[in-house]
Every structure is written in C-alpha cells, then in structure tokens.
Amino acid sequence: MTDRRSARAFVDTHVAPYADAYDRAGRVPEELLRRVAEAGLWAPFLPPEAGGAGMDWVTLGEVHEEVGRGCSSLRSLLTVHTMAAWTVQRWGSPEQRERWAPAFAAGERLGAFCLSEPGAGSDTSGITTTAAESGGGWVLNGVKKWTTGGQRADVFLVFARTAASIGAFLVPRDTPGVQVRPIDDMLGTRASMLAEISFTDVVLDRDALLGPSGFTAGMVLTGTLDLGRYSVAAGSVGIVQACLEASAAYAASREVGGTPLAKLPLIQAKLSDMVTDARAARLLLAEAGRLKDAGEASTIMATWVAKYFASTAAARHASEAVQIHGANGCSTDYPVARYYRDAKVMEIIEGSNEIQRMTIAGQADRERTG
C-alpha cells in the first residue's frame, strides 16, 4: 500500500534527481509514466474492484505533496488524471466505470481535464464549446486551452454547453475531429505537456455524457474542481518543503566572510518561516482531506483555504529560496529557480488566488449572518 514514506522514496529515486531535465525538455518521459503506473500512483483512490487501492483522501494528499516536492509537472499530470478518474467513478454509469476506471487505475489510459478556453477560465458562464444532440448522440464543437497533459492524454474530460446546461463528456483522443496543438515555453510546470484541444464536428455516442446533464454545472463540476484544488494545495505544500530542504542545505554549505549562511539571523528567519508555513499548510491540507473522507460538505471551503494558504506560501518561500541562493538561485544549476516559476503557477490554476479570497470572504460573511 502506497503511503507518504513509499511515495517519498519513489520521488527521491525516480523523480527529483531528473526534474530539472524534464523541465528543460518540456515533457515527462514515457519511462517515468510507466514507473508511476507500476507504483500504483495514478488513481489509488479508486476502489479495489475498479483496480485502485481504496486510498483515503488524507493519504492521497500526502502522496501528491511528495510528488509535488519532486516535480510540479508530474504532480500536475496526477491532478488532472485524478479529476477524470474520480468523475468517472462518481458520476459514470456502470458501463462507463467498467470501460474506463480499470484503465485509469492502471495508467493504461491517461485522462486530462478540459474546462478553460481561450476566452474563459474557471468561470463556466464563459464556456462557448457546445455539445448538440444529434442522431441519438452528440456533436461537439469548440476549443479548450491550457489543458494539462493534453499532449499525452488518451481521453479528455470535456465540459461543454448543451441546450439545457453544461455537460461533461468523455472524448477519446483518437475520435475524428479532435486536434491537439502543443503549448510550449510556459513560465512554470513546463514539463506538464500543456495543449490546446480543438473539437470540430466531433461525433460522440450517447454514453459519452457523464451524469445527468443538468447536474454538471453544479454537482459534477464542483466536485471535480474541488479535487483539482486539493491536489494543487498538496503540490504547493511540496514546493514549500522542497524550498526548505534546498535552502537549508545551501545555507549550511555556503559561507560569507567565514560564517555559514545558516548562522546569519536573517537567513535563520527565512528558514524558520518556511518550517512554520510548511507545517501550517500541511495541517490545512490534512483537515480538508479528513473532511473529504468523512463526506462533509465543508470540505469544499476547507480545500479553498488550504489551496489559498499553500499556494501563497509556495510563491513567497520560493522567492526567498532564490534570494538565499543569490545569483546561483537564478541559474538552472539549482532547482530553486524551477520552484520559483512553478510556485507562480500554483497561484493561478484551479481558481486564482483572487477568486479564492472572494470565495473565502463570502463564506465568512455567510457565517456572520448565520
């Protein structure tokens, strides 16, 4: 059974030493994707009958933290795959679960999440991609952008506007009319294989639709995005921990005027803040996971808080890690430059920090008014 310790060992052996090379190449190699499958890391939360390990959400958060500590790009691939696999398991028909869940669990088919468009992010009101009923099935038209793992994914979880609401559709990559355009040279998570996906008169069977159409904008999409935020929060905790480990090691080995950086009060203050925020963010993540395991609706807000705190902390401490490393921190010879770029992405994806602050403030107001 995978847990934090085994995940950490996996990351230290197969991921962290090569993450900078993945970043430079702009992709995660197939060999690593196979190793992730062999380790059972793609969808361990799925039940055993679906090929998973029945992993609880607290443990999954710990696993995603460890992966994020080693490589945010690989963690991003796990995130979108988690979103697709969970949605199928939660909202799919028995036939859909039988077709897709075991393949997702084994990593034989990788999933990606298609919501954002060139003119719309997480705001579903801006979706222009359409799915029209036709001949007992559906015809899909539109463009999705910033699709993590889109260059590699085998199946896309696509949110599109129907006559009644917003629908969630499973679209195999090889369906006629699907075109994938790689998006390269991004600021951060450069190895997450982003893509723009075009759908031109894509004909889908009736069973491509997940769940009742009218539920999607509310129930399906809310739950799917919640898991995305949870994984991003976990990965952000991993970035803070990576910054702490790299900065502590560098400060212990580097001297200024014969004194190790680690002995300087200003450096000690930076390191102590990293320790404190890593622990605080980890506790917030664990609370969100505990509420998920308990089936509590309050997990949605707990995840918002965890993601906001952890992503903000990641960006702040990645900046401090670069500062501690000085000019070396601005080079590709040290991983803190990658942490700095990746951390910025965490403040934007799965709901920007500005949206998170408004959402959290709105909850405070609701609690005040009872």
Image (spheres, grey):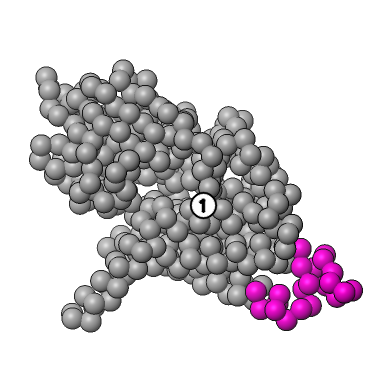
Q: Main secondary structure of the magenta part?
A: helix
- Residue 12 visible within the image: no
Identified at 55% across, 67% down, the residue is: 316
State how many labels appear. 1
At 84% across and 72% down in the image, what residue appears?
256
**Farthest residue, direction right:** 258
Residue 125 visible (yes or no): yes
Instruction: State the extent of the magenta-drawn residues as a range.
Output: 249-270
Q: SS for tag 1?
A: helix
Above/below status of 227 relative to 247: above
Q: Is residue 269 above or below residue 72?
A: below
Residue 291 x/y as whole percent: 36, 64
Residue 250 pos. (x, y %):
76, 63
Residue 196: within the magenta? no
- Give me the residue at 43% from left, 34% from top: 195
In reply to whether residue 263 is colored magenta, the answer given is yes
116 relative position to 77: left or right: left
Where does the image place residue 50, in percent across and percent down from the top left? 38, 36
Quadrant housing residue 85: top left
* Crowdedness near tag 1: few (<14), some (14–19) or many (≥20) residues, C-alpha within 10 Å: many
Quarter of the rendering containing residue 199: top left
Q: Locate the C terminus by quadrant.
A: bottom left
Q: Amino acid at mark 1?
A: His
Please indicate whether residue 186 sits to the left or right of residue 336 in the image: left
Judging depth in this view, the residue of 206 and 96 nearest the camera is 206
Q: Which of these two is toward me, 94 or 128? A: 128
Residue indicated by mark 1:
64
- Vertical placement of residue 9 versus 193, above or below: below
Find residue 288 and report its horizontal and vertical position in percent.
Answer: 40, 64
Is residue 87 positioned above or below 247 on the image?
above
> Measuring 73% from the left and 59% from the top, which residue is drawn there?
327
